[in-house]
C-alpha cells in the first residue's frame, strides 16, 4: 500500500468536508479531500440547491397563474418538465464548477474513491483502494442518506427525494410520506406544478419540530392551496403497479397515486467506514463527539450530518470551519445548536431560530411569554399576497428565546432573529432599531416593539 502524507485528511466532500478543507488550506495546511462521488455532496447535487431550483420554478408557475390579480394579462399554457430539469441541473453544474475552482485554487488534493478510516501506531489515516492518506488529523464528514421504514423498500414508483428530483415528468398525483421539511417542500413544489398531493404524517401536525402556531398556520395555507394533510396517520403498507401505488394506513384507509415519496428523515453515512475497528464511538449510527467535535480517537474529528443534531448544510459549514480553525490554534467560538436558523422553503416558507413557546414554558414556566404579529398588517406582505405570522418568544423582563416565522420569503428575515437569540437581546434593546418601510422585516420589528410595550401597528 502506497502512503501519502498531509496535514489534514478529510473524508467526505459535502458541506462540512469541503468547508473544513477550504478553511484549513486557507490557514496554510496541506489538505487531502477524499470523496467517492462529486464534490458538494447531498446539498449541492440531491438536496438544498436542486430542490430550491425546483421550488423557484414552482413559484414562477404560481405567479403566472395569479398575474391577473395585479393587472397583468398572462396564462400558464403548460409546464415543460424537461426544461425545468434542465434549469435545475444547470444551476447545480454552475455551482459545482465554482466549488471545483475554489478547491483547485486553494491547492487541495482531491482523491476520488471510497475511503475507510484506519488508525494504527502511526496515527489516523484514510485508506482508498491501495493508497493510504495519512494526516496529522482526520476529519470525518461523510454526510447522510435517505431513511425509510421497515419493510418499505425504495424502487419503481416508491421514491425518495433523489429519485423525485430525477423525474422527467410532473406527477399527476403523489402521496408524500412524512410531513417534515423534505416532505413539505416537495408537496409544495409539486402542488404548484399541478400535482394532486396528499401528505401522510404520523404526528398531529406538519413540520413537527416547529412552534405549534407556525405549524397550524402552514396547515391552513396548505389547505387553501388544495394540499391534503392526513395527520396522526400511520403508514401500514404499500403496493405498486406499473401505473401507480396504493398506500394502506393503519386506520384502514387506502390512498392511491402515481408515486409515493418517502420523506421520513435522513440517517448518518457511517456504515463501512471502519469506525468500530478504529475505536470511534457511535450511537445509533451517529459519531459521538465532545463540544470541540473530537471523537473518542485522538486526532480524529467529525462534522456535519454524522454528528447528532440538526442536519443542515449551514451547520455543516460552520462545524467544518470550526474544526479547521481549532487545528490552526485559533480558538474559535462554537455556535450553539439552538441559535442555528432553520428554514422550510415551501409556499409559504417557515423560518425559525431558538426555542418554541412550548419548550420555553416547559423550562421557564409562566415567565416565558410570546407575541404573534399577523402578516395581514404588513404592507409588503400584502403586496406580495402572502399570509402568515411572526412569533417571538421571550422571558418576562428577559431576552428573546425564539423567533418563528411563516410566510413567503420569511427565510430572508431569520438572520435578524438569530442575532437576537444568539446575543440574548431584550426586545427593549431591539425596539429602537429601524426597519425600512415597506419591508417584511417590519413585521419582526412590530413583534419586538409589542414585546417592549410600545406597539405601533398592533393593539
Image (tube, helix red, strand yellow):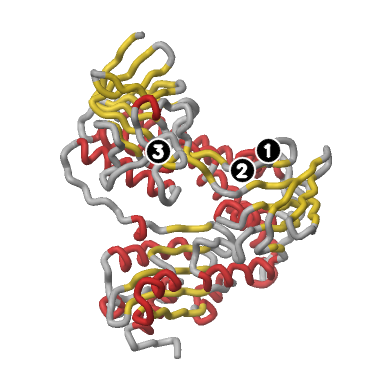
Describe the element under mark 3 as helix, strand or loop. Answer: strand
Q: What's the distance in space between the residues labelled 3 and 1, CA to CA?
A: 25 Å
Describe the element under mark 2 as helix, strand or loop. Answer: loop
Q: Residues within 10 Å of mark 1 (few under 14, many from 20)?
A: few
Q: Is residue 28 above or below residue 263?
A: above
Residue 160 on image: x %, y %: 63, 42
Residue occupied by mark 1: 153
Name which of mark 1 and mark 2 comes first in the sequence: 2
Describe the element under mark 1 as helix, strand or loop. Answer: loop
Residue 252 on image: x %, y %: 79, 58
Q: Residues within 10 Å of mark 2 (few under 14, many from 20)?
A: some
Residue occupied by mark 3: 282
Q: Considering the image in quadrants, where does the C terminus appear?
A: bottom left
Q: Nearer the viewer, residue 282 or 42?
A: 282
Of badges 3 and 1, nearer the viewer stands 3
Q: Is residue 153 above or below residue 133?
A: below
Amino acid at each position: 500500500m502506497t502512503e501519502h502524507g498531509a496535514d489534514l485528511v478529510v473524508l467526505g466532500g459535502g458541506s462540512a468536508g469541503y468547508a473544513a478543507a477550504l478553511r484549513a488550506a486557507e490557514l496554510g495546511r496541506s489538505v487531502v479531500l477524499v470523496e467517492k462521488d462529486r464534490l458538494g455532496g447531498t446539498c449541492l447535487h440531491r438536496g438544498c440547491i436542486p430542490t430550491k431550483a425546483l421550488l423557484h420554478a414552482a413559484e414562477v408557475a404560481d405567479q403566472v397563474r395569479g398575474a391577473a390579480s395585479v393587472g397583468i394579462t398572462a396564462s400558464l399554457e403548460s409546464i415543460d418538465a424537461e426544461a425545468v430539469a434542465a434549469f435545475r441541473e444547470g444551476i447545480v453544474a454552475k455551482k459545482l464548477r465554482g466549488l471545483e475552482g475554489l478547491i483547485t485554487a486553494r491547492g487541495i488534493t482531491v482523491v476520488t474513491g471510497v475511503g475507510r478510516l484506519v488508525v494504527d501506531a502511526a496515527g489516523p489515516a484514510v485508506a482508498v483502494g491501495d493508497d493510504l492518506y495519512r494526516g496529522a488529523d482526520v476529519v470525518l464528514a461523510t454526510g447522510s442518506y435517505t431513511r425509510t421504514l421497515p419493510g418499505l423498500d425504495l424502487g419503481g414508483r416508491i421514491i425518495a427525494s433523489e429519485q423525485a428530483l430525477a423525474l422527467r415528468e410532473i406527477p399527476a398525483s403523489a402521496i408524500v410520506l412524512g410531513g417534515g421539511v423534505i416532505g413539505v417542500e416537495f408537496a409544495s413544489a409539486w402542488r404548484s406544478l399541478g400535482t394532486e398531493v396528499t401528505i401522510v404524517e404520523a404526528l398531529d401536525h406538519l413540520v413537527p419540530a416547529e412552534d405549534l402556531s407556525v405549524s397550524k398556520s402552514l396547515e391552513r395555507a396548505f389547505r387553501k392551496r388544495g394540499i391534503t394533510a392526513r395527520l396522526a396517520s400511520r403508514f401500514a403498507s404499500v403496493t405498486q403497479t406499473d401505473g401507480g401505488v396504493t398506500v394502506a394506513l393503519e386506520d384502514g384507509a387506502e390512498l392511491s397515486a402515481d408515486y409515493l415519496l418517502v420523506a421520513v428523515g435522513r440517517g448518518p453515512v457511517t456504515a463501512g467506514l471502519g469506525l468500530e475497528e478504529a475505536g470511534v464511538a457511535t450511537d445509533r449510527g451517529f459519531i459521538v463527539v465532545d463540544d470541540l467535535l473530537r471523537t473518542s480517537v485522538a486526532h480524529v474529528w467529525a462534522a456535519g450530518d454524522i454528528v447528532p443534531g440538526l442536519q443542515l448544510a449551514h451547520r455543516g459549514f460552520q462545524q467544518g470551519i470550526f474544526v479547521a480553525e481549532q487545528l490552526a490554534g485559533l480558538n474559535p467560538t462554537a455556535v450553539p445548536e439552538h441559535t442555528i436558523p432553520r428554514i422550510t422553503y415551501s409556499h409559504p416558507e417557515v423560518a425559525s431560530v431558538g426555542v418554541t413557546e412550548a419548550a420555553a414554558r416547559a423550562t421557564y414556566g409562566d415567565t416565558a411569554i410570546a407575541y404573534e404579529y399577523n402578516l395581514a398588517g404588513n404592507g409588503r406582505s400584502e403586496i406580495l399576497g402572502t399570509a402568515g405570522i411572526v412569533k417571538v418568544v421571550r422571558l418576562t423582563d428577559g431576552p428573546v428565546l425564539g423567533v418563528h416565522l411563516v410566510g413567503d420569503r420569511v427565510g430572508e428575515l431569520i438572520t435578524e432573529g438569530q442575532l437576537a437569540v444568539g446575543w440574548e437581546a431584550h426586545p427593549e434593546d431591539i425596539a429602537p432599531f429601524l426597519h425600512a418601510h415597506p419591508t417584511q422585516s417590519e413585521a419582526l420589528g412590530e413583534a419586538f416593539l409589542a414585546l417592549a410595550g410600545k406597539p405601533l401597528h398592533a393593539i
